[in-house]
Image: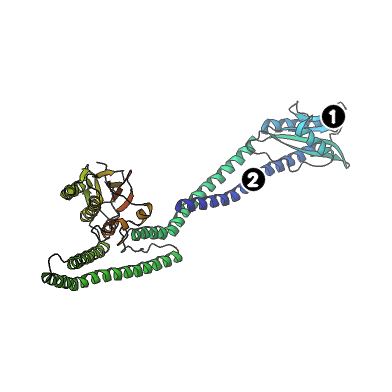
Amino acid sequence: MHTRLLPLLIVLMAAVLLALGVPLAVSLAGAQQQKVVVDRIDDTARFAALAQFVTEPADTSGNDINERRETLSAELRSYYEVYGIRAGVFYRNDAPMAHAPDFFLPRAGEVRDAFEEALLSRRSHDPEQVWPWQRSTLVVASPVIRDGDVVAVVVTESPTGQMRSRILQGWLVIAAGEAAAMLLAVGAALRLTGWVLRPVRVLDATTHDIATGRLKSRVAEAGGPPELRRLARSFNEMADNVENVLEQQRAFVADASHQLRNPLSALLLRIELLALELPEDNEEIASVRAEGKRLAQVLDDLLDLALAEHSAPDLRIVDIGAVAAERVAAWSPSADAKDVTLTGVCPPTTAWADPVALSSALDAVIDNAVKFTPSGETVEVTVASNGDTATVVVTDNGPGLTDEELTRVGDRFWRSGRHQNIKGSGLGLSISRALLAAGGGSLSYERHEPHGLRVTVSVPRNAPAGEADGQGLTER
């Protein structure tokens, strides 16, 4: 969510800054050009005043007129030499009254357009905007009016290098301000998203902890908006209620199992005493004795399941290969008694697990594999790792399970209808799954071709939160 919310805020803030910066940059460019245009208008007005009474053609004799023309020419030459601005005063027939440099004439282009506009007694106004990347000139023309008639036109053609430089410098200042504002906005967005999403991250982590069996986890106060703080408190209240319900359920199962053991033990004892008064081959008493022992086993498994779901795991770094090899050796006599070959490929592989819980889970899985594998077949135990997870895969060549049965295997008290005559309570895999889940492990089931079942016991190779220094294990 952070990676989605932060870019959205940054894009919105960038759009706002651009919406403010672009008009400001355009306004700055227009102000700089308007300043130059006003200066040129003032200059052309001054030259028009000097040329107002120099209205005779260049070949007309008259010392006073020639003197005024010489004065005007000197002003224009000085103006050109000092500022580099071409300027000239031209009669209506394009003949020059005075101009500098000598080749400057209103023949074509913008100069001609401005000249013709001034002949209509209109002063240049609002020339087209010159941008920093355009190497163009700025033309301004003013009419010379005498007795209400336009007798000549003053035209100036200004280079725009300095003006474009000033515009560019102003834009750089605006860009620097925009960049600084953007950095501040990004910093503010980071703080804002962190403030808003911190409770969400804490809530997500706590939800994951509870989902993986750490029911004591609660959402700590992490600031944020009032709505999210209220959500955190509501979540904690919900977690407390759920934990209380589960605790009551576990306590009921444990108490019921414990309380039933005494009368059941007394009942079994009475059955044994009754059996002494009956013939040894009495089938009814043998059946009652077997059912009583099975009920005692179910009560023991129920108590083990309640303890497994209630107790916290003792997680530590364990050599999974050594544990698996030990369980293979322990179950080898049982496999030999059934004429089943039990093999193990158990290289050293470290992971985080509760050794007792892992051993119990392997016992349940290997026991089932040996129990349901026909004589002459093989049960294989293989230890491997894929970087983040270590696995113990137990593969048998028994009858296997159907697709529907695979979805139910591991449920409490569930047993396949084809295996009801085999000893068991249907709680062994449920207990193993609860023991593994408390430490972040899992049990999974799949078919083994051409027949049989593959059971995978998975445990994490990275340290769980709060364990050791939180560092993962290196490959061995």
Q: Which quadrant, please, contains the C terminus?
A: top left
Question: How many marks on residues?
Answer: 2
Of badges 2 and 1, the one in the foreground is 2
| Residue type (three-letter) at the residue carrying disc 1 | Asn
Residue carrying label 2: 26
The picture quadrant where one finds residue 420 is bottom left
Can you see residue 401? yes
Find residue 284 and report its horizontal and vertical position in percent. 19, 68
Q: CA distance from mark 2 to mark 1?
A: 51 Å
Left or right, 388 with reference to 327: right
Camera-side residue of 83 and 337: 337
The picture quadrant where one finds residue 25 is top right
- In the image, residue 263 sits, relative to residue 385, either above or below, namely below
| Residue type (three-letter) at the residue carrying disc 2 | Val
Find residue 262 and report its horizontal and vertical position in percent. 17, 72
Camera-side residue of 152 and 371: 371
Q: Secondary structure at mark 2?
A: helix
Camera-side residue of 423 and 354: 423
Q: Residue at x 54, y 48 (%)?
A: 178
Residue carrying label 1: 63
Q: Residue at x 75, y 28 (%)?
A: 104
Find residue 442 and report its horizontal and vertical position in percent. 31, 53
Q: Residue at x 40, y 63 (%)?
A: 223
The picture quadrant where one finds residue 103 is top right
Contact flag, marks 2 and 1 (Cβ < 8 Å): no
Q: Secondary structure at mark 1?
A: helix
Q: Residues within 10 Å of mark 2 (few under 14, many from 20)?
A: some
Q: Residues within 10 Å of mark 1 (few under 14, many from 20)?
A: few
- In the image, residue 172 sits, relative to residue 184, either above or below, namely above
Find residue 409 and report its horizontal and vertical position in percent. 32, 56
Residue 375's label in the rendered image is: none
